[in-house]
Amino acid sequence: MRTLVAIVVAQALGLAAMASPAVYAAEVTDNAKIAELKQQLAEITEELESLNSRVNKTERHAALDRITFTGDFRVRAHSLHYQDVTWNPAILMNFSDFGARAMAGEYGDPANVNSPLGKMMAANPALATAFQSGQLSGIMPYVLAAKSRQDIDNDIYYNTRLRLNMKAQVWDNVDFAGRLSMYKNWGDSTGVQVFDSWRAFTMDGTDSSNTSGDWLRVERAYFDWRNIGGSEFYLSIGRRPSTYGPPSHYRENELRGGTPSGHLVNFNFDGMTIGYKLGELTGVEGQVVRFCYGQGFESQWGNGELFGDTITKDTHLGGFNIDAINDGNHFLQFTLFAAKDINDGFKGTMAFPNQLASIFAPTMYQDLQKFDNFNFVTRVQPSGVIGDMYLGGVGYSYETDDEMKFFASFGWTRTVGNGYAGMFGGLLSDAVFTAELNNDGSEIIMSPSTADSNENHDGYGIYVGMQIPAPYGKFGLEYNYGSKYWTPFTQAQDDPIGSKLATRGHVVEGYYIFDVNPHMFIKLAGLYYDYEYTGSGTPVGAPQKVSDVLNGTAYSLLPVIDTAFDVNASLTVNF
Amino acid sequence: MMKTTIQLGVLLLATVLAAGANAADGGNPKKGKHLYKKECKVCHSKSDAAGELTPMSKTMAQWDRFFDKDKHKAKPEVFQKLSEQDLKDIQQFLYDHAADSAQPQTCG
């Protein structure tokens, strides 16, 4: 603008200098031009003053506007169908121990119907007969209810997800980033689900991607301190960007949504990362080495019974996350993590299923029957440490210049059990229960005493897929497989049937994305799950072959899904 | 109900087709990245006299203005030697990775 004024003034002066008495006719014209130029100059000056006052306002606004908000909003309609959902509950019981204690008189006189043993035999006549005829010895299943089997169709299920991304520049090399998330079912804001699977459990690691009502949760919040002391080191601490990592972001139709491999980790973690941008030394674009550390469980704060009886331990995680190359065409990532002191669950809230009350809490069940549609909401905490875990993997994605994308990922998990088990089992092992008297000696209760195995278990998973340009958008096809002991930390994947990448079995997904405009898309998708083993998405309990549960030769305290499919349509806007 | 879902999907699809959704404006960002590295970073890397430039140096609108109006006024021959398609590709890359564009969400 200043340049423009200078030119106008220079032109005015130049024209003035050219004027001479010898050219009188021209002088009149020049005077008119000068007058016109003066007028223009006045207008420009006025415009400048107006611009100045406007720029002052925007400058002030920019200075005070410390945080930038962006976001996305997704509405999704699902049609969910489950086949052969089987509930065949039993616990492993040490009948030899039970027999020895019964013979020693520990449970009272079996002939006395008012003794603990008499009451138990009256309540379970078939079991009493089998036991007395010597059919039950050693460790055997103690069947808790008759097997049931059903197909479930949820023809239409809507949900809405709102995510608000926050960004702020603290200093030249320090940024803050965060994300607030709301994910809810239509017509539901209870925030607590009836516990029918480990997915239906509101807890820290999954509450941003498990439908939990109409409130915003802090899914992530962390700072990045880059180029520390002029080096290529950076430090980041907070609630980590540990969800929607590669290559699971392709199906989300978004850029890389998190740091770690989405095949191994899709879970809210609190922790820190120390990274080094190795690419600046090696010349390999996007090469970053990171050491990540976090705490997945706080054992003491809030867990003690009047400051005592805390027998869990803090769960600490640490490991390396290496982007070997990330140049826009090739992406190669290596992951190796260890989780020390895994407990047999998490702190969380659930609505207690009444069917479990009928099995494990018959006295309470007497009253619960009067409130058939009531479930009591309870805070749950784990009961003890079940062992350690290791996760590793390698993932590769290739994107052509014409936006064709192909990826393959291999994951490995190892569990190292310690022999301890809670109610639902130990580390990929089942609990062996023993019969004990309650505190006042009036009733026999079943208590988990040990795990049926403390062996190490290796699991592996593969995840392959592609996304190619198609008329009006993109077409994608994905397949993943998890073995019997496959146990990744991907429970925060927001698939309603359950994290597809945690599946012990096969999942096929096909989708078509219609790009309405650069900030809005419609996605039509279909997922088919074929579960081979039980317990997908949890390290607790021994995986059982689904076909064995279906034919009644294996048991599970929670319902088991054989196959399921999810057909869904979603509309997403980014703003 | 399943039928309703399918009908809903067909209706949405029809809407999209009617709208003629098309986000592309002729630039290939992947090719643009290669060209940017080859043509731009030569003079615009760290400690260069011309000053470091990355896609994050400008907003999406600022990049569009730069390509539509400024056309590298400081050194016009730089743009003149590139084909129209090359310039479109570079513009698309810079636009897609501008300061106010969607960014990968990682801790670095």
Image: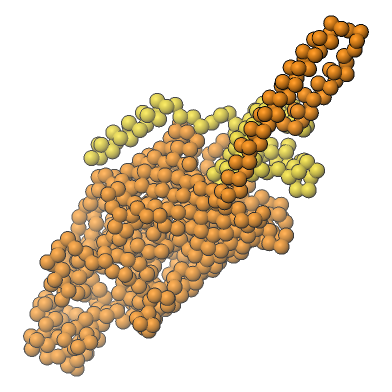
Residue A432 falls in image quadrant: bottom left
Residue at 23% over, 40% down: B1
Q: Position of residue A105 (x, y in %)?
A: 17, 93
Name the image colouring.
Answer: by chain
Q: Position of residue A330 (x, y in %)?
A: 60, 47
Q: Please, which residue is most extreme toward the right here?
A: A22
Say above or below: A530 vs A20: below
Drawn side of residue A536 relative to residue A434, left or right: right
Residue A73 seen in the current view: yes
Q: Nearer the viewer, residue A406 or A229?
A: A229
Q: Please, which residue is most extreme toward the bottom here?
A: A104
Residue at 73% over, 24% down: A41
Drawn side of residue A30 relative to residue A149, left or right: right
**In the image, which lettered chain appears yellow?**
B
- Of the 4 image quadrants, the one containing the N terminus of chain A is top right
Q: Position of residue B90 (x, y in %)?
A: 65, 35
Residue at 23% over, 83% down: A435
Residue at 52% over, 46% down: A255
Q: Position of residue A350 (x, y in %)?
A: 29, 65
**In the image, which lettered chain appears orange?**
A
Say above or below: A530 vs A317: above
Residue B56 falls in image quadrant: top right
Residue B76 seen in the current view: no
Q: Nearer the viewer, residue A56 or A437?
A: A56
Q: Nearer the viewer, residue B64 or B19?
A: B64
